[in-house]
Image: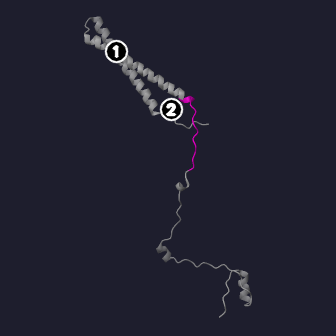
Amino acid sequence: MPNTAPRLSRSIPLWVLVGGSVVAIGAGTYLLVDKLGTMAATLTDGTATGVEVYAGQIWAVLGAILIGAGLIGLALALTVGAVRTLVPVAPVEVVEPPAWEDEVVVAETTTVESAVAEPAAPTPVVTDTAAADAAATDPEAPASATTPETPAR
């Protein structure tokens, strides 16, 4: 049975999770490397101040936390992708549209002007031709059942 559910690659929440995780890893790496590099450089040359050392430590810890959160987000995205392949998809039921939604075909209508301009042809009367032929040749012949008898005047 074909999989009729939308693919996971089209899931917006999944891509938000992946994108946010990558941004968190990038921002955390930048903070961690920048602050630890500044602390190491200023401590080795002896020009370190309290702001660089003590505030730099907090920024480095924040960078490490962002890297960890990004890695957890990527792990969750991979887990969701793996679990999605294990979940069976319910079959999609094809439903016929109701009769009132069918396309309506409108017959050509006759307007008043066209009815006046073109008079209708007289409707031919269906008669029994054998009885009519017999009546034409023999005035005493009985009339057919479909032809009404008219009294003689």
Image: 54 above or below 13:
above
Q: Which residue is found at the position 44% from the left and 32% from the top?
A: 13
Q: Which residues are magenta?
A: 84-96
Q: Which residue is found at the position 52% from the left and 34% from the top?
A: 7
Residue 60 circle label: 1
Q: Quadrant of the C terminus?
A: bottom right
Image: 153 above or below 130:
below
Q: Identify the amino acid type marked 1.
A: Ala
- Viewer-side residue, 26 vs 149: 149
How many numbered marks does the figure carry?
2
Q: Identify the amino acid type marked 2.
A: Leu
| Residue 2 on image: x %, y % | 59, 37
Q: Quadrant of the N terminus?
A: top right
- The quarter of the displayed image where residue 26 is located: top left
Q: Is residue 24 left or right of residue 120?
A: left
Mark-to-mark CA distance, 2 and 1: 35 Å
| Label 1: element kind | helix
The answer to whether residue 92 is magenta is yes
Residue 8 circle label: 2
| Label 2: element kind | helix
Q: Is residue 12 left or right of residue 97?
A: left
Residue 119 circle label: none
The secondary structure that most of the magenta stretch takes on is loop
| Mark 2 neighbour density, 10 Å: few (under 14) some (14–19) many (20 or more) | some
The answer to whether residue 151 is magenta is no
Mark positioned earlier in the residue sequence (2 or 1) = 2
